[in-house]
C-alpha cells in the first residue's frame, strides 16, 4: 500500500471501535506522526465521540505517572468546559497536601501528582495517541507502558494508537510477548521516496526540483526530515552564487549524495572520512581495503559499497574540486572556498565541457562493454590536450581506469605528466596544492602525490630541486628535507632543470648527478626515486630530435656510467 492507501486504512481501523489498541510502526522520519495529524480532525468528526483524542510522546518520560500527567494536562488545555472543575479539584488536593505534609513528613513525596487521581476520569472513553515508544527512558520499561495501556483499555474504555519504530525496540522479547497480548491491529507503515520528497519539499521554494527529486529517489531516502535537510542544504549552496541552470544541474547530484551521507543515521560512520572514501578513485563499488583482519566486510566497508553504488547510479564518475569543497562545507560550514569553486565552474564554459568529456570517458570505460581497450585508449589520447584544465582527482581517476586496460599504462602516465606540467605552469594560481594538503586522504596517482609533496616541502623550506641537488652534490650530506625534495621530483622536474640551466650551473649539476649514479651504492638507500627519475630524464633527452647537441651530451653522460643507448 502507498501512503494514501495506508491513510484510508488507518482511519477505517480507528473508526472501528472493536479495535481497542492499534499500533502504527515504521522507520524513523517517514511521517507516521504526520499521518496521524492528517486524519485527526476527520477521525474526531466521524467517530461521533464528544471527547477529543490526546497525544503524548514518550521521549524523555521517566515514569508512567509523568505520562498520565502530561496527557491530563493536554486534555485540560483542550477542554474549556472542564477547566473550572479541574482548577477546583487541583486546589482541594493542593490544600490537603500542604496541610497533611506539614504534619506528616513521610508524605513529602505526595505532591502535585495528586491530580492523577483524576486521570481515569480524564483519560477514559477517548483515544490516546502514544508516540516514540522505542525512545523509552531507561527508567521507564515497556512492561510499565503496556500495563498502563492494558489497565485503561480494559477498565476505563480507553482506546490507544501506538506510533513507533519497532525495529528500534531494545527489549524485543518483551515487546513481542506484550504485542501478542495487548495489540489488536498492527499496521506496518511504508513510504516511497517520491512521497517523502513531495512532503519534504511542499513548504520549501527551490528551483531545479526535478533533478533534486530524481537524485533523492536514486539515494532511496524515505526519512522526511533527512530529505528536508538535503533540500535546504541544496538551496543554501545554490544561493551562494547566481549560477546558471546548467551549473546547478551539474552540482545537485553531488550535493544530494554527500548531504545524504552526512545526514543519514549510520552511528559513527557519518564522517568526512566516509565521504572522502566514497569520493576516492579505485574500485567502483567496494572499499579499496574491503576487509578487516578476519577477512570479513566491516560496517564501514558496507557503507562505502552502498554509497559508491548510489554514486554510480547518480552518474558521478569524475570528481572535481567542487566535491572536495562541498565535503568541507558540510563538515565545518565554511562557504568561502565552495563559493569560489562554484564561480570558477560557472564562469568557465570550457572547464565544464572538459569535465563533461572526462566523465563521459570514465562512464564508457565502465559500462560500454562493446568498445575495445584499443578504442578506449585512442579516445583517451584526445584528453591529453585538456589535461591541464582537469583536477588532480579527475586525472587520477582517468589514469586508474586506463591502467585497467591492456596497453593503457603509457597513456595514463602521459595524462598525469601533462597535468603536472600544466599545474606547475600555473604556479601560485594553482588551487590543487592547498586542496591536497588539506585532504591528504585523497587517493591520488603516485606521480601527482610526489609532485605535490615536493611542492609542499619546497614551499615550507624555501629550497627548490636544483639547490637541493647541489647541496647533496657539494656537501655530500643531507637531511630529510633534501631527500624528500629529490625523491618527490619527477623525470619532468629534472628535464626542466636541464632545459633552463646554462653554463657552470648546468655543468656542475649534470656532472654531480652522474657522479651520484656512478657511486649508486652510497646513495641508493636515500635517493632511489631521484636516481631513477634522473636517469629517465636523461634517456628522454637523449632521443631529442630537435636538439642534437643536447641528445649527444645525454648519451655521452649515460655511457659514462654504463647505461648504453638502447638503439
Image (tube, rainbow, N blue to C red):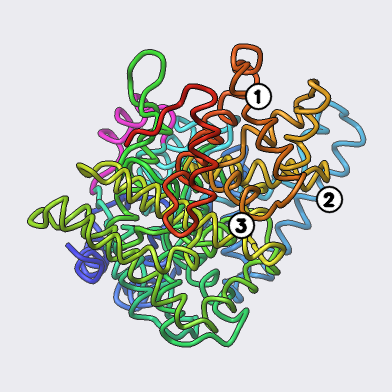
Q: Earlier in the sequence, mark 1 or mark 3?
A: 3
Identified at 80% across, 32% down, the residue is 471
User: Is 25 in front, or is 247?
Assistant: 247
- Name the front one of labels 2 and 1: 1
SS under mark 3: helix
Choose between 222 and 105: the one closer to the eye.
Answer: 222
> Does the CB distance between marks 3 and 2 fall below 8 Å?
no
* Element carrying mark 1: helix
Q: Which residue is mark 2?
A: 95
User: Disc 3 marks which residue?
Assistant: 432
Q: Is there any visible trace of residue 131 in the rendered image?
A: no
Residue under label 1: 515
Q: With 29 as the anchor, is 561 left or right in this view?
A: right
Q: Main secondary structure of the magenta part?
A: helix
Residue 8 versus residue 473 in the image, above or below: below
Which residue is found at the position 80% from the left and 44% from the top? Answer: 460
Q: Position of residue 313 (x, y in %)?
A: 27, 58
Amino acid at each position: 500500500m502507498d501512503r494514501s492507501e495506508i491513510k484510508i486504512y488507518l482511519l477505517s481501523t480507528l473508526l472501528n471501535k472493536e479495535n481497542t489498541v492499534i499500533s502504527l510502526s515504521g522507520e524513523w522520519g517517514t511521517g507516521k506522526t504526520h499521518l496521524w495529524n492528517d486524519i485527526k480532525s476527520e477521525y474526531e468528526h466521524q467517530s461521533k465521540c464528544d471527547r477529543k483524542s490526546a497525544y503524548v510522546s514518550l521521549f524523555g518520560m521517566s515514569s508512567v505517572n509523568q505520562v498520565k500527567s502530561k496527557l491530563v494536562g493536554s486534555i485540560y488545555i483542550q477542554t474549556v468546559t472542564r477547566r473550572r472543575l479541574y482548577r477546583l479539584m487541583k486546589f482541594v488536593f493542593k490544600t490537603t497536601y500542604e496541610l497533611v505534609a506539614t504534619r506528616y513528613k513521610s508524605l513529602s513525596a505526595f505532591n502535585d501528582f495528586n491530580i492523577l487521581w483524576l486521570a481515569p476520569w480524564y483519560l477514559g472513553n477517548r483515544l490516546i495517541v502514544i508516540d516514540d515508544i522505542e525512545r523509552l527512558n531507561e527508567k521507564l520499561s515497556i512492561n510499565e507502558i503496556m500495563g498502563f495501556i492494558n489497565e485503561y483499555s480494559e477498565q476505563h474504555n480507553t482506546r490507544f494508537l501506538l506510533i513507533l519504530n519497532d525495529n528500534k525496540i531494545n527489549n524485543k522479547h518483551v515487546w513481542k510477548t506484550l504485542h501478542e497480548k495487548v495489540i489488536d491491529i498492527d499496521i506496518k507503515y511504508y513510504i516511497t521516496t517520491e512521497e517523502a520528497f513531495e512532503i519534504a519539499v511542499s513548504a520549501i521554494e527551490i528551483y531545479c526540483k526535478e533533478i533534486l527529486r530524481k537524485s533523492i529517489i536514486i539515494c532511496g531516502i524515505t526519512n522526511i526530515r533527512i530529505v528536508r535537510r538535503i533540500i535546504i542544504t541544496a538551496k543554501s549552496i545554490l544561493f551562494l552564487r547566481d549560477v546558471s541552470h546548467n551549473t546547478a544541474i551539474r552540482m545537485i547530484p553531488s550535493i544530494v549524495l554527500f548531504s545524504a551521507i552526512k545526514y543519514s543515521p549510520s552511528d559513527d560512520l557519518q564522517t568526512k572520512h566516509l565521504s572522502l572514501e566514497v569520493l576516492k578513485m579505485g574500485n567502483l563499488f567496494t572499499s579499496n581495503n574491503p576487509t578487516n583482519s578476519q577477512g570479513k566486510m566491516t560496517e564501514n566497508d558496507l557503507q562505502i559499497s552502498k554509497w559508491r553504488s548510489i554514486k554510480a547510479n547518480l552518474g558521478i564518475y569524475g570528481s572535481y574540486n567542487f566535491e572536495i569543497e562541498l565535503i568541507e562545507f558540510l563538515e565545518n560550514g565554511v562557504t568561502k572556498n565552495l563559493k569560489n569553486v562554484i564561480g570558477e565552474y560557472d564562469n568557465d564554459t570550457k572547464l565544464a565541457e572538459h569535465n563533461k568529456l572526462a566523465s563521459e570517458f570514465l562512464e564508457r570505460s565502465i559500462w560500454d562493454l562493446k568498445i575495445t581497450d584499443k578504442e578506449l585508449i585512442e579516445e583517451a589520447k584526445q584528453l591529453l590536450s585538456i589535461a591541464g584544465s582537469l583536477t588532480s582527482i579527475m586525472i587520477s581517476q582517468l589514469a586508474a581506469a586506463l591502467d585497467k586496460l591492456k596497453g593503457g599504462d603509457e597513456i595514463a602516465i602521459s595524462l598525469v605528466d601533462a597535468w603536472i606540467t600544466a599545474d606547475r605552469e600555473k604556479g601560485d594560481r594553482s588551487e590543487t596544492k592547498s586542496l591536497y594538503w588539506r585532504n591528504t586522504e585523497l587517493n591520488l596517482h603516485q606521480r601527482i602525490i610526489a609532485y605535490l609533496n615536493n611542492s609542499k616541502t619546497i614551499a615550507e623550506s624555501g629550497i627548490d630541486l636544483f639547490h637541493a641537488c647541489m647541496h647533496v652534490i657539494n656537501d655530500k650530506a643531507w637531511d630529510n628535507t633534501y631527500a624528500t625534495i629529490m625523491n618527490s621530483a619527477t623525470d619532468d622536474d629534472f628535464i626542466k632543470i636541464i632545459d633552463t640551466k646554462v653554463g657552470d650551473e648546468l655543468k656542475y649539476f649534470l656532472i654531480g648527478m652522474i657522479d651520484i649514479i656512478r657511486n649508486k651504492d652510497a646513495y641508493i638507500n636515500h635517493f632511489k626515486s631521484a636516481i631513477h627519475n634522473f636517469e629517465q630524464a636523461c634517456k628522454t633527452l637523449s632521443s631529442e630530435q630537435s636538439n642534437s647537441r643536447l641528445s649527444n651530451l645525454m648519451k655521452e653522460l649515460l655511457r659514462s656510467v654504463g647505461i648504453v643507448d638502447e638503439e
